[in-house]
Image (spheres, rainbow, N blue to C red):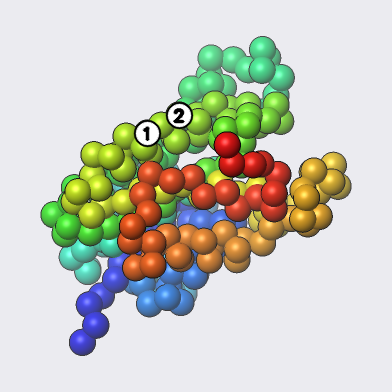
């Protein structure tokens, strides 16, 4: 009998998070979802999993999900950290509160669940953590200032984590999407894409599926660009 595989998705009620949850369920994973809207709870029910309505900015809500998943399946093999949308605007117009909000949305959304789940994976001697980041991680875009700043920090955190836990077979990688069809298309953005089109949520989900698979078992600490060619590797 095949061993049960379990994936947890935060901010998984819609968009790329929901796409990842659906794809991992199709890959045979049992699914736990956290979302603030209630959509994740409904999606988890549809997929036969566990859904919690709560925030990835709340350690208590995250713990409720992790405890429920562990009580039901006793393991967590994959963690997908999705997120919402932080403050935007001219860089000097952003307030202290805006920057602190960006920190919560774009960096602490990974740090909080990782603190809870990485020790479980360490005991299992296996696990994959996949963070949905942004194409603007290394080439900051003035349209998305808080995202670029804090997801650059996420790249550093990911490398530190990967170096620390690689020997335990616990991996962490970032997916760097470009403009994706989970949001309304804007012509000004489409013109910037060498491939000439927005990416599909299903393409991001397929990348996450790969990073969760045995085929990616020797990949850690990396930033995988899925952006239609907007950015170039250095």
Q: Nearer the viewer, residue 219 or 120?
A: 219
Tag 2 near tag 1, CB within 8 Å:
yes
- Residue 192, horizontal then vertical, whole percent: 80, 43
Residue 194: tell me if it is visible.
yes
Q: Which mark is residue 153?
A: 2
Numbered disc 2: secondary structure? helix
- In the image, residue 87 above or below residue 190: above
- In the image, residue 74 above or below residue 34: below
Q: How would you rate the neighbour count of disc 1 (Cα within 10 Å): few for under 14, some for 14-19, many for 20 or more? A: some
Q: Residue at x 32, y 34 (%)?
A: 160
**Which residue is the extreme one toward the bottom?**
1
Numbered disc 1: secondary structure? helix
Q: CA distance from mark 2 to mark 1?
A: 6 Å
The C terminus sits in image quarter: top right
Q: Residue at x 68, y 14 (%)?
A: 93
Identify the residue position indicated by label 1 in the image.
157
Q: How many marks?
A: 2
Q: Nearer the viewer, residue 76 or 67?
A: 76
Q: Which mark is residue 68?
A: none
- In the image, residue 62 above or below residue 33: above
| In the displayed structure image, the side of residue 89 where residue 9 appears, left or right | left
- Residue 175, horizontal then vertical, whole percent: 51, 50
- Residue 35, horizontal then vertical, whole percent: 46, 52
The N terminus sits in image quarter: bottom left
Quarter of the figure with residue 104: top left
Q: Residue at x 63, y 31 (%)?
A: 139
């Amino acid at each position: 009998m095949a061993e049960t595989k379990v994936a947890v998705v935060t901010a998984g009620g819609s968009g790329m998070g929901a796409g990842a949850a659906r794809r991992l369920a199709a890959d045979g994973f049992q699914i736990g979802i956290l979302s603030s809207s209630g959509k994740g709870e409904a999606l988890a029910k549809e997929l036969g999993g566990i859904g919690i309505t709560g925030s990835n900015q709340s350690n208590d809500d995250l713990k409720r999900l992790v405890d429920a998943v562990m009580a039901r399946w006793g393991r967590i093999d994959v963690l997908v950290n999705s997120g919402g949308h932080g403050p935007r605007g001219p860089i000097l117009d952003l307030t202290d509160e805006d920057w602190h909000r960006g920190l919560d949305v774009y960096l602490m959304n990974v740090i909080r669940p990782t603190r809870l789940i990485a020790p479980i994976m360490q005991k299992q001697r296996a696990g994959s953590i996949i963070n949905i980041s942004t194409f603007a991680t290394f080439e900051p875009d003035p349209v998305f200032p808080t995202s670029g700043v804090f997801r650059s920090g996420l790249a550093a955190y990911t490398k530190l984590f990967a170096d620390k836990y690689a020997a335990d077979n616990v991996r962490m990688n970032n997916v760097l999407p470009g403009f994706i069809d989970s949001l309304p298309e804007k012509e000004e953005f489409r013109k910037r894409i060498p491939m000439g089109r927005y990416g599909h949520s299903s393409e991001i989900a397929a990348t996450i599926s790969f990073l969760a698979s045995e085929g990616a078992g020797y990949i850690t600490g990396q930033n995988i660009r899925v952006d239609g060619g907007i950015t170039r590797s250095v």
